[in-house]
Image (cartoon, rainbow, N blue to C red):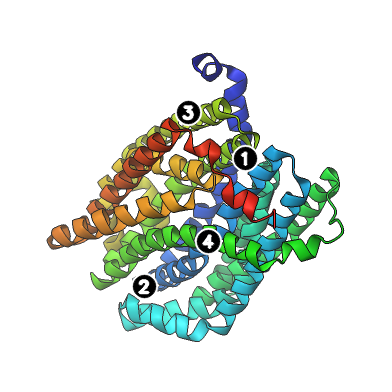
Amino acid sequence: MWSSFLNGARHRQVFALALPMVLSNITVPLLGLVDTIVIGHLEHAYYLGGVAVGATIISLIFWLLGFLRMSTTGLAAQAVGAGDGERLLQVLARGLLLAWGLALAILLLQQPLMELAFWLVGGSSEVQLYGREYVTVRIWSAPAALTNLVLLGWLLGNQNARAPMWLLILGNGANILLDIWFVLGLGWQVKGAAAASVVADYLAMALGAWLVWRTLQARGLIPSAGFWQRTLHLVAFKRLLGLNRDIFIRALCLQLCFAFMTFQGARLGDEVLAANAVLMNFLMFISFGLDGFAYAVEAMVGKAAGERNRSGFRLACGLNLFWGGVVALLFTLVFALAGEPLIGLITDIPAVRTQASLYLPWLVLMPLAACWCFILDGIFIGTTRGREMRDMMLLSTAGVFFPVWWLAQELGNHGLWLAMLCFMLARGLTLGWAWWRLDRRQGFMVHDDVMRETNDV
């Protein structure tokens, strides 16, 4: 084990998967950062607050459906490890069908969803007005956004990090350029930021479809006789939905905590809401940077599980946990040394800058507290261990985040950030305990029931 860990080729394998995803993932919070910079230089804080609330609502809707990528990555990686081409095709087909059905439901239910979300948000009338403007436009990217989750997960499960990298870079790069043009050039303000995201999502979907088609051709994957009958089998979908249900509950808890940060910040005033929007962009940089290694470990452990290679599985876990910790330390140093200048780059509104600087120390601590849960999430996703992820997230949310906030709410916004820090620590500790327990009895290597049963029907 240790000789393999010290093997430079093994570390290069990690970076071959992780580095493209780190580089491309950073474009995601960079997009949010550009949104915040462009809107943050308008004359009133409520424009920034409106975009923060609107983007949080959209993220809550789309990211709750993040199981589309997660389950697709794990199942595709296991199919690759097992050398099962038809199973690999079925993972793609079922994922796309599920994504399109969910997108249709979102579009049909957009009005009641928006009313419920803004009822929960609160905030000033101006924040509500501009938040609604953002959501009304942005919701129409649902078909493309959900399709992109499946395409991204399937490509990554194929041990191909370059294709997802180009998918994310094109989509987010186009979004940034369109954002500047629509908001500053055309003067569309909040609606411009939303429209830029819609157009960029459809451009990314077109590229993703082409990349998947190239992969299918390279692997020589074509549907065999009876493929669609087996793919559309009700029992197969029922079992797949069971896996996705667990990941959905996990995502619901996670997004509930992030949304609570924004919504509760709105109740503390427009300046606090805007300051939290600035700091949450920094948190997104942390999460998407670390997710590069989480994505790498998903592909690596999923393939090892498909091969039933326990030593390869444990090596993949150790390598990615190590590099995740290194990257987290770098993030901590950056925010400690350059946090305030970065805040000044985002917004020139004095009240917002003052508030953001006040709560900056929480961001300095966050990377080292959070890095472990990101990598451990990847291990459980790659091995399609949805039930354990669900249970540990429920424990961290109901047993840590909300109790800590309740006890510390007299601290105001400091209490919110304390709850988030404790939540991240709890996720890492509980997932680490679950990982240790399963690995001790080789539970990861014997758990391929979902992969097998959703296909052998």
Q: Are marks 4 and 1 in contact (CB under 8 Å)?
A: no
The quadrant where residue 174 appears:
bottom right
- Identity, as a three-letter code, of the amino acid under mark 3: Gly
Residue furthest to the front: 457
Tell me the residue at 39%/58% (across/down): 254
Along the polypeptide, which appears first: circle 4 or circle 1?
A: 1
Counting residues from the N terminus, which is met first, the one under dot 4 or under dot 2?
A: 2
Q: Reading the chain from its start, which is encountered first: label 1 or label 2?
A: 1
SS of the residue under disc 2: loop
Does 30 sit left or right of 303 as displayed?
left
Q: Earlier in the sequence, mark 1 or mark 3?
A: 1
* Residue highlighted by disc 4: 242
Label 1, residues with CA under 10 Å away: few <14, some 14-19, many ≥20: many
Mark 4: give few (<14), some (14-19) or many (20+) Cα within 10 Å.
Answer: some
Label 4 to label 1: alpha-carbon separation: 31 Å
Give the residue number, with chain letter if any, for mark 1: 20
What residue is shown at x 26% (from left), y 45% (from top)?
Answer: 361
Q: Which mark is residue 318?
A: 3
Local crowd at mark 2 within 10 Å, few (<14), some, or many (≥20)? few
**Which amino acid, mark 1?**
Pro
Residue 143 seen in render: yes
Q: Nearer the viewer, residue 206 or 195?
A: 206
Q: Secondary structure at mark 3?
A: helix
- Is 237 in front, or is 189? 237
On residue 63, the disc is none
Image location of residue 147, percent across then percent down? 66, 64
Q: Report if the CB atoms under discs 4 and 2 are less than 8 Å apart.
A: no
